[in-house]
Each structure stands twice: as C-alpha cells, then as structure tokens.
Amino acid sequence: MPSLISHFLRGFAMGTADLIPGVSGGTVALVLGIYKRLIVSIRRGAGALGALVRLDFSGFLGDLKAIEWRFIAPLLIGVLSAVLALSHLIEGLLEDYPLHMAGLFFGLVVGSIFVAWRIVERPNGLTWGILVVAAIVTFWFLGLRGGTIEDPPLWVFFGSGAIAICAMILPGVSGSFMLLMMGMYAPVLGAVNDRRVLAVLVFALGCVIGLASFSTLLNLLLDRYHDLVIAAMVGLMVGSLRVLWPWPEGTNGTSLALPAGEIWGPVLLAAVGAAVVLLITRKEKAIAADVEAAGEAAGTVP
C-alpha cells in the first residue's frame, strides 16, 4: 500500500507539471527516479496495441501482462487526479491574469530552453544551424494563427492530443506547451472543466494513439540522431516564445508589442518561472548522479 500511495503522489506531481507550459512531466519523472520504468511501460503498452491491431491476441495479452501495473496504474490515476483538480484553477488564472500567466509561462519555457540545450552532447555548427532554422520557421508559422482556436472540432482535439502526448517522454519539452503553441491549451482545459466528456475522450484517444505510434519512432530518432533532434526541439521552443510574449494580450494571440501597462508583475513571474525550472533540473542532475554512483557501487559487489 505505501508504494501505491507513493506512485500516486508521483503521478500527481507529473500531472501538475503537465498542466503548466514549460514544465515537462518527463523532467519530473526523471527527478523522481521513475523515468526509465515509465518508458518501459509505455513501450510495452505500445507493443500491446500493435499486437491488437494485428489481431495477435496472445501477443496482446502477453504484452499486457508484462506491464508493471502496480506501478503504472496508480501513477496514471495520480496524473488524472491532478488534471481534474487543478485545471479549473489554471483556467481561471488565465482568464483573470492573462499578462501575468503569460509572463510566468514565458519564464518557464526560457528556463526549459537552457535545460534542453544542455542535453545536446556535442554542439557544433550543424546543431546550431538546425536550432536557428527551427526557431525562425516556428516563429513565422505561429504568426499565421490568431491565438486560441475557438470551438475546435473533435478531430482537432484528437490531433492535438496525439502531438502533445509525445512531449511526455521528452524531458524538457512540455505537453501543455505544445497545446499552447497549437492554440489548444485553453480549449482542452475548458473541455475538462466543463465535463465535455466526448471532447475529453477524443483527446484521450488521440493521446493513446499518438503515444503508441510515435514513442518507438521518437526513441529510434533519439538513439540515432540525438543531438539533431534535441536541437530541432530547442529551436521549436525558442520560436514558440512568440506565443508567450505577454504584451499586448498574453496567451490570447501572437501579435507582439513593447511592454506597456502592467510590466513588473509579468517580468517578476518570468524570472521566478525560469529559476524554478533551473532549480528543478539541478536537483534532477544531483539525483541522476546519485543513482549512477549507486549503480556503480552495486556493480562492484560480487
């Protein structure tokens, strides 16, 4: 029972992080020391879905049995509990304090940019070039949309879920950030808060299909082209700061203006957001070092 409660609390922490653009649930999983177990469970779940599609029922059941359910079930319940408990609060803050929330999110993403770039193992001219190109293209592309999508159809909920969930397996990249970039952050929060069951189920289905479809490919790309993939994602995050620039309208649009009116509140929250991310990842590195040292020590035991 204590382990189930601890897994639930870890899931609640991940779900809280996934609600906040700029904070990655994957990063929290790393900090809490469960990232590798989570990835293994995701891969087994993807294998089970693949077997089901091929009508390989014995393989499907075998993959299901191989999933560490005593770990993954309370973790998922914790994630869902955080989303249900906190989404209304965040939606209200976005409506009442759009500039302040944009400033906070801006700082969180800036901090995540520095963290994600440190993941690049061998920076060179090519990685810098990919970062710059990705940033310019993203910045330009986001200028074509007018902010939050109003009354999105169900297929947009499905597609946004499929894309955003992939950020879950990438420390440093936030699923909520991806939703915000696509203009779907507020609509998804609204669907959860208004208990629009069909929209939420379609979004969840997109998450399941996206995770099953892209997790293996994404891990393959990271294995073969690690630095190039990370550089492209950092560029995406840099370009997408356009969405989070507080002035003139917070996260409600992509138009840009010089700071005016309320200035110090958003600036202070941006600084706090960046500091929080950097402190979290500093703790993550310390934990990773401790785990590695423990593993080496265990390896020396006959």
Image (spheres, rainbow, N blue to C red):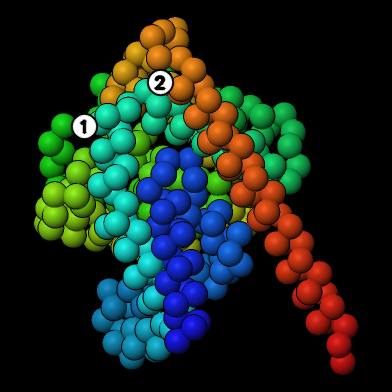
Image point (45%, 59%), residue name: 14
Mark positioned earlier in the residue sequence (1 or 2): 1
142 in relation to 108, above or below:
above
Image point (29%, 57%), residue name: 85
Q: How many marks?
A: 2
Can residue 180 be seen?
yes
Nearer to the camera, 102 or 174: 102
* Residue 138 in the image, given as x and y percentages of width and height: 44, 27
Going by the numbered disc 1, the residue's amino acid type is Ile
Graded by Cα atoms within 10 Å as few (under 14), some (14 to 19) or many (20 or more), the crowding at tag 2 reads many
Q: Is residue 79 left or right of residue 267?
A: left
Nearer to the camera, 265 or 27: 265
Image point (69%, 42%), residue name: 118
Name the residue beneath numbered marker 2: 246
Q: Is residue 14 left or right of residue 52?
A: right
Give yes or no for contact between labels 1 and 2 (Cβ–Cβ under 8 Å).
Answer: no
Going by the numbered disc 2, the residue's amino acid type is Pro
Query: Which label sits on residue 212?
Result: none
Considering the image in quadrants, where does the N terminus appear?
Answer: bottom left
* Residue 280 in the image, given as x and y percentages of width and height: 61, 49
Dot 1: what SS?
Answer: loop
* Residue 151 in the image, given as x and y percentages of width and height: 12, 36
Can residue 221 be seen?
no
Image point (81%, 82%), residue name: 298
Graded by Cα atoms within 10 Å as few (under 14), some (14 to 19) or many (20 or more), the crowding at tag 1 reads some
* Residue 234 in the image, given as x and y percentages of width and height: 56, 36
Name the residue beneath numbered marker 1: 149
76 in relation to 18, above or below:
below
Q: Is residue 299 left or right of residue 75?
A: right
